[in-house]
Amino acid sequence: MTRITQFAYGAACYALFLATFSYAAGFLGSVDLLPKTIDTDPAPLSRTAVLINVGLLSLFALQHAVMARPAFKRRWTKIISPRIERNTFVLATCLVLGLLFWQWRAIEGTVWQAEGGLAMSLTVGYWVGIAIVFLATVNIGHFELFGLRQAWENLHGRTPARIEFRTPGMYGYVRHPIMTGFLIAFWCVPTMTVGHLLFAGVASAYIFVAVHFLEERDLIKVFGSRYKDYMRTVGSYLPIPPVGRRPVPSASKSEA
């Protein structure tokens, strides 16, 4: 692939990400304008529906966890150009999410149904969670996180800058603000159906496992004691430091 072709590929992957993220926000928020959401055409609870939904979520977890690991990247970049590795990761994530949106089975049954002011507050909370996700990507380097910056640098023949440890914006208060935003969005809904509860429970479990058993181990290997200090001084998901914690100086880590 030429540099121009690689840039076009990276730009197309980024455009697909924007479309996928936008659809995901509407899908989880049950926006009626979309052709299908998490609660469209619900059917009675069945083993088939549960197995299909858990399988779709597991496929996303497997793709996301495996492709984000440094060991996989080292082997993967012997097959594809390192210049398009991040773009390909973004593409694969979008395709898996697209499959999930398409094949998701809505399940009947209401766990809770908020009304009036509480429903409005939960709806606002949901969109605040989505906003936190997006703003956190801006803090950490939005275009780099989704591969567009790498494509641009490659187009101009520049070598990507060395990864540095920084804690910009929300990362000075929470180690994983992207995940905080997702957790808020998963649970802060006025109507929690059985299908949505299944999604929220499995997706939340994946976040905790991926963050604490995969991502943070990789970050410790890369940044060593500096990241361990960060872990001691900043909470994982909530900006409420224990007594005795000291503020972290603004100094990036990548969110898997």
Image (tube, helix red, strand yellow):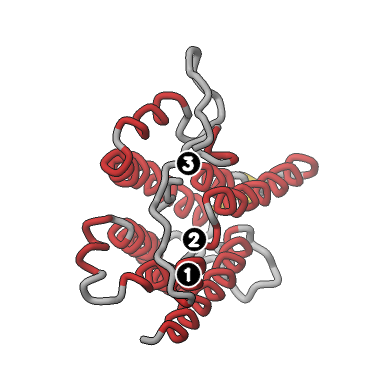
Which callout, 1 or 2, points at the residue further toward the start of the chain?
Answer: 2
Task: Find the distance from the CA under tag 2 to the CA under tag 3.
Answer: 14 Å
Query: What numbered label is drawn on residue 166?
Result: 3
Relative depth, front residue between 232 and 114: 232
Specify few, some or many for label 3: CA neighbours under 10 Å numbering under 14, 14-19, or 20 or more.
some
Name the residue type under label 1.
Glu
Task: Find the distance from the CA under tag 1 to the CA under tag 3.
Answer: 21 Å
Relative depth, front residue between 101 and 128: 128
Specify few, some or many for label 1: CA neighbours under 10 Å numbering under 14, 14-19, or 20 or more.
some
Instruction: Determine the residue positioned at 50% across, 72% down.
Output: 152
Which callout, 1 or 3, points at the residue further toward the start of the chain?
Answer: 1
- Residue 13 on image: x %, y %: 48, 75
Relative depth, front residue between 175 and 49: 175
Instruction: Determine the residue positioned at 41% across, 70% down.
Output: 96
Instruction: Determine the residue positioned at 47% across, 41% down.
Output: 166
Q: How many marks?
A: 3
Name the residue type under label 2.
Glu
Residue 209: quarter of image: top left
Which of pointers 1 and 3 indicates the residue nearer the eye? 1
Instruction: Determine the residue positioned at 23% across, 61% down.
Output: 72
Query: What numbered label is drawn on residue 128?
Result: none
> Considering the image in quadrants, where does the N terminus appear?
bottom left
Name the residue type under label 3.
Arg
Q: Mark 2 and mark 3 in contact? Answer it, CB < 8 Å.
A: no
- Residue 176 on image: x %, y %: 48, 41
Query: What numbered label is drawn on residue 153?
Result: 1
* Residue bearing mark 2: 144
Q: Secondary structure at mark 1?
A: helix
Q: Secondary structure at mark 2?
A: helix
Residue 15, placed above or below residue 127: below
Q: Is residue 45 visible?
A: yes
Residue 5: quarter of image: bottom left
